[in-house]
Image (spheres, rainbow, N blue to C red):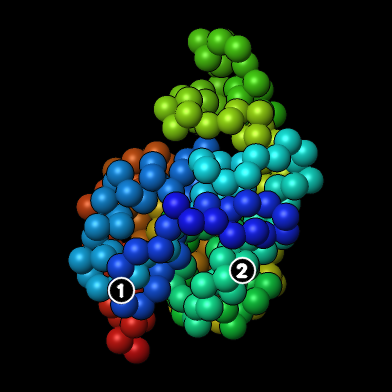
Amino acid sequence: MEYFQSEGVRIAYRDEGEGPAIILVHGFASTHLANWVEPGWTSALQEAGYRTILFDLRGHGRSGKLYDPADYSPALLARDLAGLIEHLGLKRPHVMGYSLGAMIGLRLASDAPQLFGSLIAGGVGARLFEPPSHVEPVIAAMEANDPASIMDPAARAFRIFADHNKQDRKALAACFARAREPFTRQELSRIAAPVLVIAGERDDLAGPPGPLADAIAGGQAHVVPRRDHMRSVGDAETKRAVLAFLKNVTRS
């Protein structure tokens, strides 16, 4: 891993391969390894001719840990991504984010439309127009001493995932308290890059991707059959759709 400083926070990243650059932004309670390396994304993208750049979000993996929810505002998370683009001197890279990573990508693409060549927003959909759900249950799940005491299924899944990835749960609780906020159609209308919104057919956390894609001028939607939030990211159909999208936007 290499490191750079963003807003005083040490951010860990990996830069591998050659070709057009694509930055991979993982989801909440995940890491660059769990979201992108282990499911085969880095190998698939590099075989397709892309330079893959992966990083751990603040509070996650090998990046700096903070315990004040104010340190995880969507604006700060977006500035970490912008800082990585600047640090590496990238010109209009592709960006692929999943769940929280997709929200970060959408936020930066709205605030700085000139930065991206394209954006893939996975694990998100119509629910981004609504206030965040499961906030208190997920925070409680991160703070619980005994995972067996967690009754909320979504919160329990995040806790199991966090423990599997050996995460700092106190930092994750602070992150979840602040990192997500709803989007407006006006904000999304500012996005200039082509965008693929992709979510599982059974992803109740994301909702259908179509309404979100419709709010973006260059947006298109893709539904992954029979997959939920946790299982969509590594699915072969997800990879097929993403690689086809990238091939099309790179060619154009």
Task: Judge whether 41 appears above or below 84 on screen.
Answer: above
Q: Is residue 67 left or right of residue 172?
A: right
The residue depicted at 68 percent of the width and 52 percent of the height is 9
Toward the bottom, the furthest residue is: 252
- Residue 184 numbered mark, or none: none
The residue depicted at 67 percent of the width and 59 percent of the height is 6
User: Mark 1 is on which residue type?
Assistant: Glu
> Tag 2 or tag 1, which sits nearer the N-term?
1
Q: Which residue is mark 2?
A: 82
Task: Judge whether 161 appears above or below 112 on screen.
Answer: above
Q: Is residue 54 left or right of residue 179?
A: left
Out of 231 and 209, give the one closest to the viewer.
231
Observer able to see residue 189: no
The quadrant in which the C terminus is found is: bottom left
Give x and y (percent) for residue 244.
27, 71
The residue depicted at 56 percent of the width and 66 percent of the height is 84
**Corner quadrant of residue 144:** top right
- Residue 18 numbered mark, or none: 1
Label 2 Cα crowd, 10 Å radius (few <14 / some 14-19 / many 20+): some
User: Mark 2 is on which residue type?
Assistant: Ala
Task: Judge whether 121 appears above or below 176 on screen.
Answer: below
Task: Judge whether 86 appears above or below 1 on screen.
Answer: below
- For label 1, the SS is loop
Measure how far apart labels 1 and 2 are at the Cα level.
21 Å
The residue depicted at 38 percent of the width and 45 percent of the height is 33
Toward the front, the furthest residue is: 2
Out of 119 and 91, give the one closest to the viewer.
91
